Image (cartoon, coloured by chain):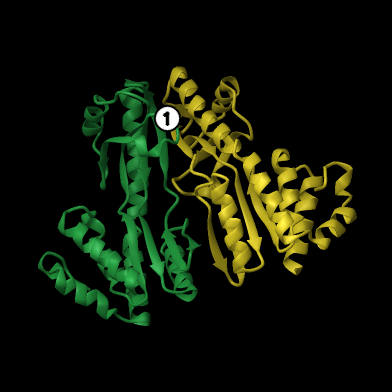
Chain colours: A green, B yellow
Amino acid sequence: MKAKREALTSLFTAMREGKVDEDIIELLLLINSIKGVYTTSSCSGRIGIIEEPALGAKPLSRWLIKVHRPIEFEEALDALRNAREGLIFLKSQPPIFHIVAEDMENAKKLHEIGLASGFKYTTFKVISNRYLVEINATEYLTTPLGKDGKVLVDEAYLRFAIEVGNSMLKRSKGRLTRLEENFRKLREELGEDELFYELVRDFEIEKNWRIP
Amino acid sequence: MKAKREALTSLFTAMREGKVDEDIIELLLLINSIKGVYTTSSCSGRIGIIEEPALGAKPLSRWLIKVHRPIEFEEALDALRNAREGLIFLKSQPPIFHIVAEDMENAKKLHEIGLASGFKYTTFKVISNRYLVEINATEYLTTPLGKDGKVLVDEAYLRFAIEVGNSMLKRSKGRLTRLEENFRKLREELGEDELFYELVRDFEIEKNWRIP
């Protein structure tokens, strides 16, 4: 699969540049080692504070802080001091995986894996001839905190909202173990991909990460 | 399509019982009049206040207030007086349509219509042999307001959060016009469904609603 070669090249380059969330790297390697599937953009789940200059103007948004683990109250407070313009949101988002499948049959299997692992918002699209599965969950928090540099909540509320956001993140990340088990089973079923191991060697991935 | 007959029976019965959001009825009728597709659960978009006894225990949640138009500050305040137990959230959700397509080709068309109409979170699933398309947008607000009957935000913040939630709802509902235009074009392309008009007569739908 030419597309898979490009995707893996892209992933391994990003990994070597430190641009991939460490806590899902093993899972990404596992998924990509399977014949007939490969990942594109994926995220291990995150919580942070973001400024959106205008509602919906996503490219112009800037994160004041963004972490892939529960956020601390103090670091959130610090980050809020940099708020300048636009709506300020506390956002908590679950892990999300985008996986391309070679054919409809594999796409359906990926879809079932997502749902069976508790990622209830797993869906897919067909774009050109690619079957793109999105493994996603429902634990999204989107809480406005203020506007144009001014924070409109008190510290007690901020603590509370952060607590709720962190709980959601823990819950959704907690499913990653089950997801990994289900991908191991899929690997036994579909087999390993030689191309993956070839590129692992080319990029010397085994030097820093455990290879499935 | 036997499944379409059942779905239309279900929809028309619910409409006569006043259980379907009035502001999307015309659009639902338009979509269902098209050969080869039919709607299942759909919602015109809403904003409200909900109590969730335990994070994620969705069936046990109860809405304190839920409206399909921008919410008023006073009615939100009144509703909050009934908060008792669990996490209290202000939630704003865009219109969402679930449409079953007869085959992959139609599913792809529906998918394109959703995206072309600005519903950027349009996806689909294949379940058994049914192609289920979900036309969905990104404007979701999930704001914790308090816990176990106690509201942890002041009135100024509540006004602010409601304003943000209402803006989101107006934006996403504003796309319904474009969605309707695109479905009219699809109808010209795929044609009318005789079954739809047969059931419209059986259920006397034309007495209270405009038939496409």
Residue at the image position 76 percent from the left and 60 percent from the top: B191
Image position of B175 with respect to A203: above or below = above
Report x, y in % for residue B26.
Answer: 75, 44
Residue at the image position 65 percent from the left and 63 percent from the top: B101
Q: Camera-side residue: A29 or B10?
A: A29
**Quarter-of-image position of residue B24:** top right
Task: Name the element at disc 1.
Answer: loop
Chain of the residue where label 1 is placed in the rendered structure: A
Q: Is residue B211 left or right of residue A72?
A: right
The amino acid on which the numbered mark 1 sits, given as a three-letter code, is Ala
Residue at the image position 42 percent from the left and 73 percent from the top: A102
Q: Quadrant of the N terminus of chain B?
A: bottom right
Report x, y in % for residue B35.
Answer: 74, 62
Residue at the image position 69 percent from the left and 51 percent from the top: B185
Q: Camera-side residue: B151 or B19?
A: B19
Q: Is residue B204 left or right of residue B10?
A: right
**Quarter-of-image position of residue A203:** bottom left
Q: Number of numbered discs present?
A: 1
Q: Camera-side residue: B115 or A138?
A: B115
Report x, y in % for residue B45.
Answer: 60, 40
* Residue at the farthest top position: B156
Q: Which residue is mark 1?
A: A54
